[in-house]
Amino acid sequence: MLDWSSLLPGTALWALALYLPLSVPLARLDEALAEGPLPEGLRVIVLLLSSVLLAFAVGGITQLALGWALSPSWAASLGLMVVLAGAFWTIASRRDES
């Protein structure tokens, strides 16, 4: 029997790493919700939940695929490296703007 708890840390890391790149295409959903009958507060909640669920779904698929190809621990380590690289590039780009 497969122990799914070993995949959770890597899934969370990949979801964090992929959250911003995946939330950019959700602008179309935001536009569609703006035209709909939902109030502003509910629209923000729907948009936030959909972006988080999308990131976790893609993070889980990424963790499963890399865990199958490499191993779950290597896939989680790679996810951590992607998160840290994203943070590094964010800090570096802010320094260039100053």
Image: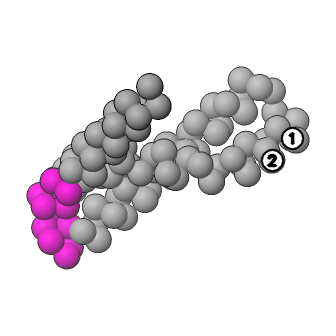
Relative horizontal placement of residue 78, taking residue 40 as reference (left or right): left
Question: Which label sits on residue 36?
Answer: 1
Question: Which label sits on residue 95?
Answer: none
Snapshot quadrant of residue 94: top left
Residue with the most extreme bottom position: 69
Question: Distance from label 2 to label 1 (Cα)?
Answer: 6 Å
Q: Residue at x 21, y 50 (%)?
A: 81
Q: Amino acid at mark 2?
A: Ala
Mark toward the viewer: 2 or 1: 2
Vertical placement of 47 versus 26: above or below?
above
Q: Position of residue 65 (x, y in %)?
A: 29, 71
CA neighbours of label 1 inside 10 A, class few (<14), some (14 to 19), many (20+): few
CA neighbours of label 2 inside 10 A, class few (<14), some (14 to 19), many (20+): few
Looking at the image, do the residues carrying marks 2 and 1 touch, with CB atoms under 8 Å apart?
Answer: yes
Q: How is the image coloured?
A: one colour
The residue nearer to you, when weighing 60 against 80, is 80
Vertical placement of 1 versus 85: above or below?
below
Element at label 2: helix
Specify whether residue 76 is painted magenta: yes
Q: Quadrant of the N terminus?
A: bottom left
**Can you see residue 19?**
yes
Question: Which region is colored magenta?
Answer: 67-78
Q: Quadrant of the C terminus?
A: top left
Specify whether residue 59 is painted magenta: no
Q: Position of residue 3 (x, y in %)?
A: 16, 58
Residue located beneath label 2 in the image:
32
Vertical placement of 20 versus 98: above or below?
below
Q: Residue at x 37, y 56 (%)?
A: 59
Relative horizontal placement of residue 11, taking residue 48 as reference (left or right): left
Q: Residue at x 28, y 61 (%)?
A: 63
The residue nearer to you, when weighing 60 against 89, is 89
Q: Residue at x 20, y 67 (%)?
A: 67
